[in-house]
Amino acid sequence: MILLYVLKSAGALSWIQTLAMVPSLCLVYAFMCLSAWYTCRGTPLESSSFYRLALTHLSGAVIISGIWVAIAKGWASALASVDAFRGLDQKFVPDYPLLFASGVMIYLLAVALHYVLLSVEFSREMEKREIQARVLARDSE
C-alpha cells in the first residue's frame, strides 16, 4: 500500500496505471526476497564481521533491486501495448530510482526478518536440546 501511494504521488501515473503495476511487481519481489534466507544462513550474525554482513546484504539488495527494476521496465512495456495503458513505459521512467531505492529497503527488511526467524529457530532448537538433556539426566538417575 505504501509503494502504491508513493509511486502514485511521485510520478505521472494514474491510479489505474499504478494499480496495474504495483501489485504484480510486489508479488514478484516477494518471491525474490526469499533469496535473503540463504544469504542470512550463509552469513550468521554471531560469527560474521560487520563488514562481511554489510557487503553481503547490500550487494544482494542492489542486485535483486536492479533485477526488479528490469522486470518493472518489461512489465511497463508489456502494458504499454494495451490501449488503456498507452505510454505507460515512458511515464514510469522517472519512478525507476524510487522503485530501486524501495527495493533496497524492502530487501534489507526481508534480511532482518530472516535473521529474526533464524534466531527463533535456534531458540527452539536449544529448548528442545535442554528438554532432551533433562530427560537423559532423569533417566540416568
Image (cartoon, helix red, strand yellow):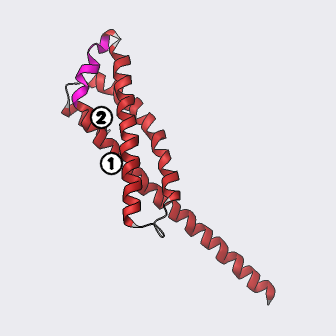
**Is 89 drawn above or below residue 7 in the view shown?**
above
**Is 48 drawn above or below residue 3 in the view shown?**
below
The residue under the point 30% across, 39% down is: 100
Asked if residue 3 shows in the view, the reply is: yes
Magenta run includes residue 92: yes
**Main SS of the magenta segment?**
helix
N-terminal-most mark, 1 or 2: 2
Q: How far across and how far down the image is residue 119, in percent?
A: 51, 65
The residue lying furthest to the top in this view is 83
Residue beneath disc 1: 105
Looking at the picture, which amino acid does disc 2 mark?
Leu
Label 2 crowd bin: few (<14), some (14–19), many (20+), radius 10 Å = some
Looking at the picture, which amino acid does disc 1 mark?
Met
Q: Secondary structure at mark 1?
A: helix
Of residue 55 and residue 94, the one placed in the foreground of this image is: 55
- Please give the count of numbered marks on the rendered protein: 2
| Boundaries of the magenta span | 84-94
Residue beneath disc 2: 4
Asked if residue 107 shows in the view, the reply is: no
**Is 92 drawn above or below residue 138 in the view shown?**
above
Q: Check the picture and name the quadrant holding the C terminus.
A: bottom right
Q: How far across and how far down the image is residue 50, in percent?
A: 37, 65
Drawn side of residue 2 relative to residue 138, left or right: left
Q: CA distance from mark 1 to mark 2?
A: 15 Å
Location of residue 77 by image quarter:
top left
